[in-house]
Amino acid sequence: MTLSRIELAAGFIVSAQGFGGMALTEVYGGLDQEQALKTLHHAVDAGVTFIDTADVYGAGSNEELVGRLLASRRNDVEVATKFGIEGSPAAGYTGVRGNAEYVRTAAEASLRRLGTDVIDLYYMHRRDTSVPIEETVGAMAELVAAGKVRQLGLSEVTADELAAAHAVHPIAAVQSEWSIWSRDVERQVVPRAAELGVGFVPYSPLGRGFLTGTVQVQSLSAGDFRHRVPRFSADAMDANAAVVEAVQSVAVNVGATPAQVALSWLAAQGRKFGLPVVPIPGTRKPERVDENLGAVSVTLSEADFDVLDAAADLVVGERSANPTWVSKGREL
């Protein structure tokens, strides 16, 4: 199998599927760093070139892990990282910062941890509403002018925030949660991105593992991040089982796995809305990397889409404990 390449933004070409580095942190429980590095190498060997991380993942340790990969494979990889969140996914977030000086300081720290002289795609991880977005993006644009960053991205912004940022400097990509059970971005953000020529990078395309049918809330470790996500509460999980059943039924119908169905659905949504879509599923297991990449050969019928659309309407629980933390909460 050959993984195709896609032009996420003008002149910025990446693998059609990326790898989400947050999975290779303590956020979902303990892990072995050497095995995590082997998984990263396996992903690149399999054709994944687009590696996503953030300064907040593992308090910088995930960037350092990706830096170990880059040490021998920098020319094989487009690396994306982010700034702006204080705290950690595992212990809890404590704040958001987007002032110009912080942007510059955060970028220098990320460059050191990654062991590289340029970041291919640099995201504002969350919107600091106390700072004009023009200031934040203006500081990011200075990093491009200085040759320290190649492309700019935004995470969990509203359509209006995206337009305001794009007016300061071209935005290559928006990264927000988007999957069969998280579709709120389709109302405003995705159409605006398509209008502006901005690519989309869905995080948690497998619903933080839920859509694969392998997640049982009672089995999650005490430190698992998902305990704080409302739709992973015991009551919500019982109701949301209908979504998993729908994905599983389609998987049986097309001869694929639930994960492959979820990723194939996203590719089709990109075609529907007319913009490049590069999902970044994360995993700790090399065999799951291979399974995810198998989605490129899966084709869904209109009947399959009908089943999945109907299931999406049944989802119970918000995707974030803090409504304003994601674009949906600031759009309402």
Image (spheres, grey):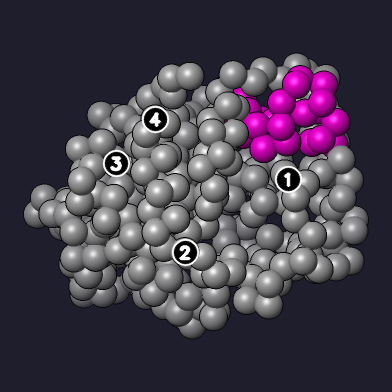
> Image quarter for residue 239?
bottom right
Magenta: predominant secondary structure element?
helix
Badge 1 or badge 2: first in the primary sequence: 2
Query: In this rendering, which labeled residue sits more in front, label 2 or label 3?
Result: 2
Mark toward the start of the polypeptide (3 vs 4): 4
208 relative to 234 in the view: left or right: left
Q: Which residue is mark 4?
A: 47
Q: Amino acid at mark 3?
A: Glu
Badge 3 crowding class, 10 Å Cα cut-off, few under 14, some 14 to 19, many 20 or more, is many
Q: Earlier in the sequence, mark 1 or mark 4?
A: 4
According to the image, label 1 marks what residue? 211
* Foreground tag (1 vs 4): 4
User: Crowdedness of circle 1 by 10 Å Cα count: few (<14), some, many (20+)?
Assistant: many
Q: Nearer the viewer, mark 3 or mark 4?
A: 4
Using the numbered discs, state the Cα–Cα distance from disc 2 to disc 4 in whole angstroms.
23 Å
Determine whether the residue tagged by mark 2 lies in a helix, strand or loop: loop
Is residue 205 among what the camera can see?
A: yes
In this rendering, the answer to whether 114 lies above or below 251 is below
